[in-house]
């Protein structure tokens, strides 16, 4: 040992013990992934094996290592708190308590809606000579001139577009709900001090993904389905006349639903009232099909009535008292319907007649 008591040279045994301690520290640091702390400790220990070390330097090194570790821990704590605050803000805005329910209702409306192919004339003829050479055709005449095979291919493409849209919206809805649940788990674990690096990283990724899913869902809910890409014009041009170019797109009509508050029955009559979702009930030229079916076929000789009307209510007479009837309403199918699977059904029981 030197005269200066604050310095020393390590013996072989002391170096072996310190080597073992270094290996233990190295395993711990690899697990914690503190790269700066790991580098500082490695440099300091290697110095112990190569030259005499001043005790004051050892103490200073330990102080620096402690400060580095404290800084790393403080930085990680701030990062986790910032992530928690971002998630809380998301829950207070785009994912508040009723937001998931609204998203599910919007998806349900889209799934229950009817989708129609709309064909429009493109106003591309600019010169007077071109306009004079173009057939002055009414909408009914245009429809009769459309090539039915080409129309069939366009309707098939439109049906695929609608099915794809509904599939993507349903998938996005599921991912949003799943993301919301995982973010709630992070908040719970954070409040109990159970968050590790792996959970923090996966939650940060899920937070970003959930925001992207919300943006995508909102964008697809408002986008227009068209114009469709027509590989061939729907009207075959024979060369005798210039025929107008046509474009095609998809129109959406909200589902028809019974008004269960206004609809009612007596002992032998049924008054039915329905509406279109999102206040589309005032749309003109709407025609509806209404079905009434007895659920007691033996007593009512298999009663099944189908009728159409252009109003939003209808009344049925001569029903049997104390019987269950099933009522169904839907839009009348038209030639350009490309998707519309849902109909609203309601079961009512006529009142019994007291003797």
Image (tube, rainbow, N blue to C red):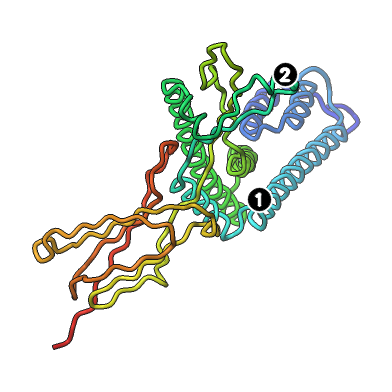
Identify whether 214 is placed above or below 267.
above
Q: Mark 2 points at which residue?
A: 129
Residue 60 image position (x, y, % from top left): 86, 36
Camera-nearest label, 1 or 2: 2
Query: Mark 1 near mark 2, Cβ–Cβ under 8 Å?
Result: no
Identify whether 125 is placed above or below 342.
above
Q: Name the residue under label 1.
A: 87
Residue 98 image position (x, y, % from top left): 56, 60
Q: Which residue lies furthest to the front in this view?
A: 132
Residue 117 image position (x, y, % from top left): 50, 35
Question: For numbered disc 1, what is the local secondary structure?
Answer: helix
314 and 259: which one is in front? Answer: 314
Tell me if mark 1 has few (under 14), some (14-19) or many (20+) residues whose alpha carbon lies within 10 angstroms of its own: many
Residue 22 circle label? none
Identify whether 134 is placed above or below 57.
above
Query: Mark 2 or mark 1, which is nearer the start of the sequence?
Result: 1
Q: How many labels does the image show?
A: 2
Q: In which quarter of the image is residue 333?
A: top left
Taking the image as shown, residue 68 lies to the left or right of residue 163, namely right
Taking the image as shown, residue 152 lies to the left or right of residue 236, namely left
Residue at image point 82% right, 40% down:
63
Taking the image as shown, residue 204 lies to the left or right of residue 113, namely right
231 and 90: which one is in front? Answer: 231
41 and 196: which one is in front? Answer: 196
Cα–Cα gap, marks 1 and 2: 64 Å
Q: In which quarter of the image is residue 321?
A: bottom left
Residue at image point 59% right, 24% down:
135
């Amino acid at each position: 040992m030197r005269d200066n008591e604050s310095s020393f040279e390590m013996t072989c045994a002391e170096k072996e013990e310190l080597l073992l301690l270094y290996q233990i520290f190295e395993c711990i640091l690899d697990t914690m992934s503190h790269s700066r702390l790991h580098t500082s400790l490695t440099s300091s220990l290697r110095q112990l094996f190569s030259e005499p070390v001043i005790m004051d330097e050892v103490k200073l090194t330990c102080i620096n290592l402690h400060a580095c570790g404290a800084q790393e821990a403080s930085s990680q704590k701030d990062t986790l708190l910032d992530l928690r605050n971002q998630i809380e803000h998301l829950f207070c805005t785009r994912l508040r308590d009723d937001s998931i329910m609204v998203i599910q209702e919007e998806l349900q409306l889209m799934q229950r809606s009817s989708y129609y192919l709309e064909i429009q004339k493109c106003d591309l003829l600019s010169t007077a000579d071109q306009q004079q050479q173009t057939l002055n055709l009414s909408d009914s005449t245009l429809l009769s001139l459309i090539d039915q095979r080409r129309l069939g291919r366009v309707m098939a493409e439109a049906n695929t577009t609608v099915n794809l849209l509904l599939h993507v919206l349903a998938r996005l809805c599921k991912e949003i709900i799943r993301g919301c649940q995982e973010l709630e788990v992070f908040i719970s674990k954070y409040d109990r001090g159970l968050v590790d690096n792996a959970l923090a990283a996966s939650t940060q990724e899920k937070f970003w993904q959930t925001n992207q899913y919300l943006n995508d869902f909102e964008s697809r809910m408002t986008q227009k389905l068209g114009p469709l890409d027509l590989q061939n014009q729907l009207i075959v041009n024979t060369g005798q006349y210039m025929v107008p170019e046509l474009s095609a797109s998809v129109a959406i009509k909200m589902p028809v639903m019974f008004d269960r508050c206004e609809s009612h029955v007596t002992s032998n009559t049924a008054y039915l009232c329905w509406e279109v979702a999102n206040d589309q009930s005032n749309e003109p030229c709407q025609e509806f099909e209404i079905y009434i079916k007895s659920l007691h076929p033996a007593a009512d000789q298999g009663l099944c009535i189908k009728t159409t009307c252009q109003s939003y209510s209808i009344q049925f007479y001569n029903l049997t008292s104390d019987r269950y009837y099933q009522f169904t309403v839907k839009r009348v199918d038209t030639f350009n319907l490309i998707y519309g699977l849902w109909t609203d059904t309601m079961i009512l029981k006529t009142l019994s007649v007291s003797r």
